[in-house]
Amino acid sequence: MNNKKYKIWSSDWTETVNIEDSFLDPFSEACTRVVEKSLNNKNKMSLKINPVLICQCLDTNEQKTMNSYKILQNAGFYKIAEFLRNYFYEESEVDLADEPLSSSIKHI
């Protein structure tokens, strides 16, 4: 089983994680692991999470935007996910629950 390195970033932080090739969606797994680790090890109120996370496979340079609401849910942080969803909806009238988990970033 091979590992690939993923870089995930949000508003004021960047983390790197190795993910096994066995996952159906390694981008989602990478983001989930980083969020779980960060929220379990830090003061939850001091970690800033944007409505989307950027995730890049450093081995292939493929990048995806990831829906932070769905990543937070996957990591088991349902209250924080709902807080982010409600706050973002009030600011933008976009419901993160209705948005896809991820989308590819196209380079122009």
Image: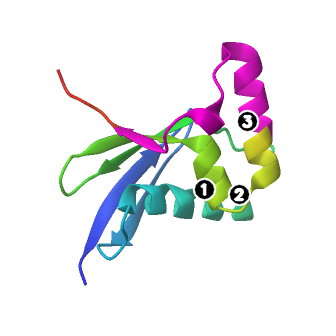
Disc sitting over residue 84 in the figure? 3
| Relative side of 66 to 72, left or right | left
Q: Are marks 2 and 1 in contact (CB under 8 Å)?
A: yes
Quadrant in the picture for residue 27: bottom left
User: In this rendering, does residue 28 appear at all?
Assistant: yes
Of all residues, the one furthest to the top in this rendering is 92
Where are the magenta residues, as a range?
83-103
User: In this rendering, does residue 51 appear at all?
Assistant: no
Identified at 72% across, 15% down, the residue is: 91
Q: Find numbered disc 2 in the image and state the secondary structure of the residue it sits on.
A: helix
Using the numbered discs, state the Cα–Cα distance from disc 2 to disc 3 in whole angstroms.
Answer: 14 Å
**Front residue (pair 38, 26):** 26
Q: How many discs appear?
A: 3
Q: Position of residue 22 (x, y in %)?
A: 32, 77
Q: Which residue is denoted by mark 1 in the rendering?
A: 35
Of all residues, the one furthest to the front in this rendering is 98
Query: What type is the residue that disc 2 sits on?
Result: Leu
The C terminus sits in image quarter? top left
| Relative side of 36 to 58, left or right | right
Q: Which residue is denoted by mark 2 in the rendering?
A: 39
Identified at 81% across, 44% down, the residue is: 45
Identified at 66% across, 15% down, the residue is: 92
Query: What type is the residue that disc 3 sits on?
Result: Leu
**Front residue (pair 81, 14):** 81
Sequence-wise first label, 2 or 3? 2
Sequence-wise first label, 3 or 1? 1
